[in-house]
Image (cartoon, rainbow, N blue to C red):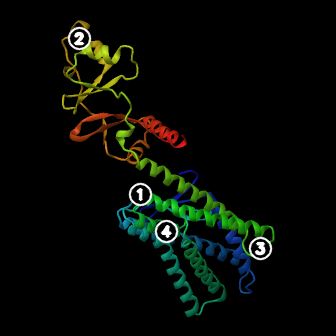
Amino acid sequence: MNNNIRVGNLFGIPFYVNPSWFLVLGLVTFSYGEQLSFFPQLNGLLPWLLGFIAALLLFASVLAHELGHSFVAISQGIDVKSITLFLFGGLANLEKESDTPLEAFLVAIAGPGVSLLLSAIFFLVGFNFNLSTPIEAIIELLAFINLVLGLFNLIPGLPLDGGNILKSLVWKITGNPNKGIIFASRVGQVFGWLAVAIGGLSILGILRFGSFWTLLIGFFLLQNAGNSAQSAKVQETLNGYTAEDAIIPNSPIVVSGLTIREFVNNYVIGKNQWRKFLVVNEEGTLSGVLEVERLKKIPTSDWTEIRLFEVIQPVTDLITIQAEATLLEVVKLLEDDPFKQLTVIGENGQVLGLLEKNSVINLLQKDKQKLAA
């Protein structure tokens, strides 16, 4: 997983930290430890130790936020591949999107809900218990950070949770999840540019609020919102085509009733593209496969008498997909092995042809050329 470091498992979910996490851990420890050093009852290394504990508790709050998303996703039957802590917070990597807008909304709202609940708990603890001043300061810090974490993530733009909430609402209205992603991504880019402007103006001394971190957060929003929009557009395009549209022209399909001589004359001599053919019966359903190399073992004097169904091999390793399946489904099947070929099956089990990664790419390039024309 890139440069992420695996720490262990949490409730069966792989848990990682990005190297950038250690930078923030050090900065928070130093800055907060320095503030605690002003308390007269804290001497020596104690302020820095408490600062380190406070930093870990802050990241524990971020982790609780991501676990909120994860537990709701798991309740919907969605596998959580991992949770990663990094420079700007955390990320729960889900196996797939929720099946309905309501389920997507519940996953999105769970994280901020956990943060706001923790904030309320910490505020109650701070106000109702007689704590020592340094401990009270840490409790108040945790209450404030969880409040900010919850409210900040409710900003209605991707990649923030508020963007996922907005996406689910647009999905509900339009019936199209990709339209929701694109709209929420555009809103996220607006907030990204706003954060960049505020951060830049604050660095120049023109604004009294904002900071260098505001600038970084703005660039983070811009990059991720742009990626989300681009990904959604690609998925929208892929959903507009079916597996049948991406079939390789002149796919290697032959009828089992052909003699070997007819097959060689029409499909092999002068044609070097295919070394293996799908053999179908008169109804067009798959009978077996034929490897051209095996024909060398048969005397050429018998080629006019022997028909293909007599020399075909049984089907063992073919991967099939229905003709009406979307190209997005096709891409998901191909992504783990770019050299994989899929056999496209039509109505009544008829074999329509093969498709592979290159045939998908060629189809999309033709689509792009048509749009540009």
Secondary structure type for disc 2: loop
Q: Label 4 vs label 2: CA separation?
A: 67 Å
In x, y percent, where is residue 125? 54, 88
Q: Residues within 10 Å of mark 2 (few under 14, many from 20)?
A: some
Q: Judge left or right: residue 23 versus residue 127.
A: right
Q: Are marks 3 and 1 in contact (CB under 8 Å)?
A: no
Residue for badge 3: 207
First in sequence: mark 2 vs mark 3: 3
First in sequence: mark 2 vs mark 1: 1
284 vs 220: above or below:
above
Q: Residues within 10 Å of mark 3 (few under 14, many from 20)?
A: some
Residue for badge 2: 303
Residue for badge 4: 166
Residue for badge 1: 96
Q: Nearer the viewer, residue 310 or 49?
A: 310
In x, y percent, where is residue 130? 59, 93
Secondary structure type for disc 3: loop
Query: Residue flagged by tag 3: what amino acid is it?
Result: Leu
